[in-house]
Image (cartoon, coloured by chain):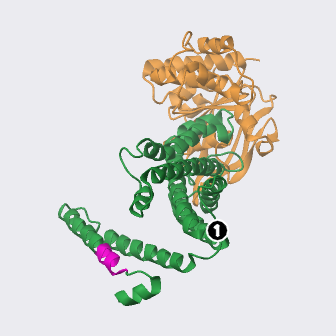
Chain colours: A green, B orange
């Protein structure tokens, strides 16, 4: 088995597979502890472990196969990731129609703008080995931001439907009636990113910087590069949250400017 | 012309607001069915009925916060679907059962509606409105720190600030104690008389309907069961 893996990928994977098994065993042991405390996450833990391992291994295999291909392949991979991110984020929007489209546009705007900016300043190159890993981090962060903004927006409108309808009843435009909910959704989705920036290096050393140091990069260079990535992640998150909230705003009202409680998952008081 | 309490304006006055065959269904369940209702200029009409009879649903349809699934409403003879929703809601003002004041000052709340159409009120106009609802000097106060009665008065002033042609009141005293209820009732009557306003008030209380309105509609299970003067309905005529 070890020999076959070595032949296929140019590196012996036996060791890392054993380590992955060890990490999984630790998770299963923790799951056992949870079970003793009547917290039943057995099925979800096993499914998540298997799913996570298979997905990341598959991505690794795909990357290994296409690592030396051109820029176009990298863009296609990032596009596929953006579609997957939009599909996941749109699950947080309850019954809001067109949520996938909204999340796709938001994630694409946030991550696309940011990756283009990184390319413009030379922080990422067109090489697939840089573009895909860094791009995927930005897309993943944009996805989380879209999820948080969408969920917060929907929940805030549902919780404050009386205020929203009071504003409509006084002749306010729908955009004005939910302006506070848009602000709240965007800010809420940015809090984790702001905290991450503030605590960079003090509370945590991010995985990318750690990986670069392990690979022999100068720690100062690795640290500054990590800052660039974190700043770009913040920018991507902010653009994504803003676009998601502003687009979702248009989807919770009818053409006659009535709040659709069904779309925000609320009921009449 | 200024109608007094208990009087129905003469039949020659045109219908200010008229519902024709109005209905609404949600998920196949009828909330209101085939409502025909006309209110004349300056008339005060009370809508009464038990909880769940469709009273609040009717008011929400009248200023188009909800969409009818049957029929329509005419404002001064014009199908309200032809009137831009924001203009309609300004002209058909609604005071909700739960007032939902916006975070900020009383002044900001009262000036909210006119600001939406870029016609902000002066502080003098806001103070005059507040004085009219018995809240002189309240303009700079935090809207989140008012009593139930004060909150409802601010809500009324906020709606009046839009200078509506028709006033819809959805159980405006249901959350108030007796003293505050009488205060709001008296205030509403005075303002309606002063402005010769057309008003539809929803209540579950026939005596209150009798105190405020010249004509009463009884709703049951989303349908009109009876229409008449308070005296006719009290005496079962």
Up the image or down, A172 lies above or below B10; here it is below
- The answer to which image quadrant residue A1 occupies is bottom left
Quarter of the rendering occupied by the C terminus of chain B? top right
Mark 1 surroundings: few (<14), some (14-19) or many (≥20) residues within 10 A: some
Q: Residue furthest left?
A: A36
- Name the residue located 78 percent from the left edge and 30 percent from the top edge: B11
Up the image or down, A53 lies above or below B122; here it is below
In the displayed structure, does residue B194 sit left or right of residue B155? right
Secondary structure mostly taken by the magenta-highlighted segment of the chain: helix
Does the image show residue A44?
Answer: yes
* Magenta extent: A13-21
Up the image or down, B39 lies above or below B151; here it is below
Does the image show residue A154?
Answer: no
Badge 1 element = helix
- The answer to which image quadrant residue B60 occupies is top right
The picture places residue A90, in percent across and down from the top left corner, at 55, 60
Up the image or down, A165 lies above or below A132; here it is above
The picture places residue A252, in percent across and down from the top left corner, at 62, 50
- Name the residue located 63 percent from the left edge and 30 percent from the top edge: B229
The picture places residue A13, in percent across and down from the top left corner, at 37, 80
- Name the residue located 70 percent from the left edge and 18 percent from the top edge: B121
């Amino acid at each position: 088995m070890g020999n076959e893996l070595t032949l296929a990928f140019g590196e012996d994977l036996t060791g890392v597979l054993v380590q992955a098994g060890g990490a999984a065993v630790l998770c299963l042991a923790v799951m056992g502890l949870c079970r003793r405390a009547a917290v039943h996450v057995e099925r979800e833990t096993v499914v998540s472990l298997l799913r996570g391992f298979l997905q990341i291994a598959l991505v690794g295999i795909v990357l290994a196969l296409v690592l030396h291909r051109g820029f176009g392949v990298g863009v296609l991979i990032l596009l596929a990731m953006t579609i997957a991110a939009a599909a996941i984020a749109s699950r947080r929007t309850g019954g809001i129609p067109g949520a996938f489209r909204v999340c796709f546009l938001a994630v694409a705007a946030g991550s696309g703008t940011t990756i283009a900016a990184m390319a413009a300043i030379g922080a990422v190159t067109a090489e697939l080995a840089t573009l895909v890993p860094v791009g995927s981090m930005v897309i993943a962060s944009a996805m989380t931001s879209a999820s948080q903004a969408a969920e917060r927006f929907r929940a805030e409108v549902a919780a404050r439907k009386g205020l929203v309808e009071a504003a409509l009843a006084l002749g306010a435009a729908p955009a004005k009636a939910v302006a506070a909910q848009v602000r709240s959704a965007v800010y809420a989705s940015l809090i984790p990113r702001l905290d991450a920036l503030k605590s960079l290096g003090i509370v945590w050393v991010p995985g990318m910087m750690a990986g670069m140091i392990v690979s022999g990069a100068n720690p100062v260079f690795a640290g500054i590069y990590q800052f660039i990535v974190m700043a770009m992640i913040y920018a991507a998150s902010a653009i994504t949250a803003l676009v998601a909230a502003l687009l979702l705003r248009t989807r919770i009202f009818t053409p006659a400017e009535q709040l659709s409680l069904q779309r925000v998952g609320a009921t009449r008081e | 012309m200024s109608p007094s309490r208990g009087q129905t304006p003469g039949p020659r006055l045109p219908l200010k607001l008229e519902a024709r065959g109005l209905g609404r269904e949600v998920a196949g369940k009828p909330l209101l069915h085939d409502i025909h209702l006309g209110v004349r200029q300056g008339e005060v009409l009370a809508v009464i009925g038990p909880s769940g009879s469709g009273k609040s649903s009717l008011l929400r349809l009248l200023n188009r916060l909800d969409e009818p699934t049957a029929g329509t409403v005419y404002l001064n003879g014009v199908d309200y679907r032809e009137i831009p929703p924001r203009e309609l809601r300004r002209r058909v003002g609604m005071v909700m059962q739960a007032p939902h004041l916006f975070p900020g000052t009383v002044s900001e709340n009262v000036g909210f509606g006119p600001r939406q159409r870029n016609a902000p009120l002066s502080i003098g106009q806001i103070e005059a409105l507040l004085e009219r609802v018995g809240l002189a000097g309240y303009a700079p106060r935090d809207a989140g720190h008012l009593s139930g009665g004060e909150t409802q008065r601010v809500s009324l002033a906020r709606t009046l600030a839009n200078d509506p042609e028709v006033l819809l009141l959805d159980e405006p005293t249901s959350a108030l104690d007796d003293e505050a209820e009488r205060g709001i009732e008296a205030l509403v009557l005075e303002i309606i008389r002063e402005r010769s306003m057309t008003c539809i008030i929803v209540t579950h209380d026939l005596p209150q309907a009798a105190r405020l309105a010249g004509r009463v509609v009884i709703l049951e299970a989303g349908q009109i069961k009876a229409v008449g003067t308070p005296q006719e309905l009290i005496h079962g005529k």
